[in-house]
Image (cartoon, grey):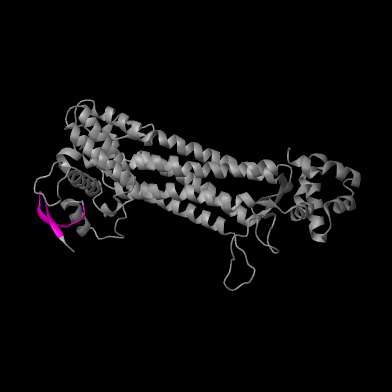
Amino acid sequence: MEFRIEKDTLGEVNVPARKYWGAQTERSRNNFKIGKPASMPIEIVYAFALLKKAAALTNAELGVLEKNKAELIARVCDEISSGELDDQFPLVIWQTGSGTQSNMNLNEVIANRAHVLKGGNLNDTEKFIHPNDDVNKSQSSNDTFPTAMHIAAYKSVAEVTLPGLEKLREMIHTKSRDYMQVVKTGRTHFMDATPLTLGQELSAYVTQLDNGIKAIKNALIKVAEIALGGTAVGTGLNAPEGYGKKVAQKIAELSGLPFVSAPNKFEALAANDAMVELSGAFKRVAVSLMKIGNDIRMLASGPRCGLREISIPANEPGSSIMPGKVNPTQAEALTMVATQIMGNDVTIGIAGSNGQFQLNVFKPVIAANILQSAQLLGDACLSFADNCIAGLQPNLPVIQDNLDKSLMLVTALNPQIGYNKAAEIAKKAFNENITLKEAAVALGHLSAEQFDEWVDPGKMTGI
């Protein structure tokens, strides 16, 4: 491989000749060979490009950066955002906890690419744009990385997480409405309980998702607050007057999202509580999805020896040894995703709790986990909606058979004959394998006509 010489404050470094990054990126690439190369989420890179463009344009408007330099920086940032330079960002998550090396990776690539766009050569000793003095002007890694985290997280939630959740919610809501009159036996403690309708059962999932969506949207209020303008420790040192507010407005304008300048930059650098709150909302939804996925696969269990009260699509063969077997794979995928999100939340909670003094230095691992959760959540909900819920149907004969055999219909007799006599009827019916009606009449507690009048599963659902 051919190399060129790049310099930083520690000296000279050999850098691959055709790469735009510089000395600090190369040092990080060599010093942190942990995990897969280029594992820093590309969403963070794109978020950095957005904020670097906003910073350059704001600096130009405030008179601290030449307009031609700002325009070149913005042009390169657009190239990065469009994916043209993805191979220029080789760094891993497991680097400095402030994300300094990723910040410098962006600064170096932008500076060198801008120099080339102006007609220069990567081997030139002096370059038109400096990574620190120009690209990083009015900034610090300590306020840019958390800003990139917030931009990337907000965009991922808006573009992936919420659309997936909302589609799943709407599809379950449609099924709930369609099957609101399908009366079935309820279950508590995995045991028979009083009846409800399949629509009522599904409506619980709709409300769980509604509440989860609300929690995520509430968390986004704080995610919209960005740290940029706090520079090194929150004081705004080396940033011009009014920079924080103005650059936040520029980021909002460029992204189309409601970003604002964080009211307290000390908190914005020292803590990552907004990420912890967002992850907590993700975990809440994951807990809901775990229940929904497990319920669906248990209700669909069978096809002959399980509950089989509903049928779900047969998407692929389920076994390499058992011919004809089909498994609830979408529910399995959904619940695995839920497990991953719960695990990510543990990581984010631990990382978020370890901010010391003026900076939390667990930012890259927080960013990686929050973005993975956001992506998985949206993708899994879409997949479950399209490949499972869309084809969900009630197995009416099985539902009716289970309802007819349910001993808990006897609960409707409590107001008429009392709990003890009702329990006696249920016990007799079970022990002698006869119907509740037969047991009630045999015990003399009520007539057949009274049983038919008082024990009506449909009336017991409240519909």
Residue ranking furthest to the front: 119
- In the rendered structure, the answer to whether residue 239 lies left or right of residue 212 reads left
For the point 89% across and 53% down, the residue is: 442
Give x and y (percent) for residue 459: 78, 40
- In the rendered structure, the answer to whether residue 211 lies left or right of residue 350 reads right
Give x and y (percent) for residue 87: 28, 54
Give x and y (percent) for residue 430: 79, 58
For the point 24% across and 30% down, the residue is: 58
What is the span of residues highlighted in magenta in the rendered image? Answer: 3-19
For the point 32% across and 55% down, the residue is: 39
Specify whether residue 358 is in view.
no
Give x and y (percent) for residue 402: 75, 54
Locate residue 145: give its quadrant: top left
Confirm whether the magenta stretch covers residue 12: yes
Q: How many marks do you count on the picture?
A: 0
- In the rendered structure, the answer to whether residue 341 lies left or right of residue 416 reads left
**On-image quarter of the N terminus:** bottom left
- In the rendered structure, the answer to whether residue 75 lies left or right of residue 200 reads left
Q: Nearer the viewer, residue 195 or 318?
A: 318
Locate residue 35: give its quadrant: bottom left
For the point 23% across and 41% down, the residue is: 142
Q: Nearer the viewer, residue 254 or 18?
A: 18
**On-image quarter of the C terminus:** top right
Specify whether residue 440 is in view.
yes
Q: Nearer the viewer, residue 426 or 251?
A: 251
Q: Main secondary structure of the magenta part?
A: strand
Above or below residue 162? Residue 398 is below
Confirm whether the magenta stretch covers residue 428: no
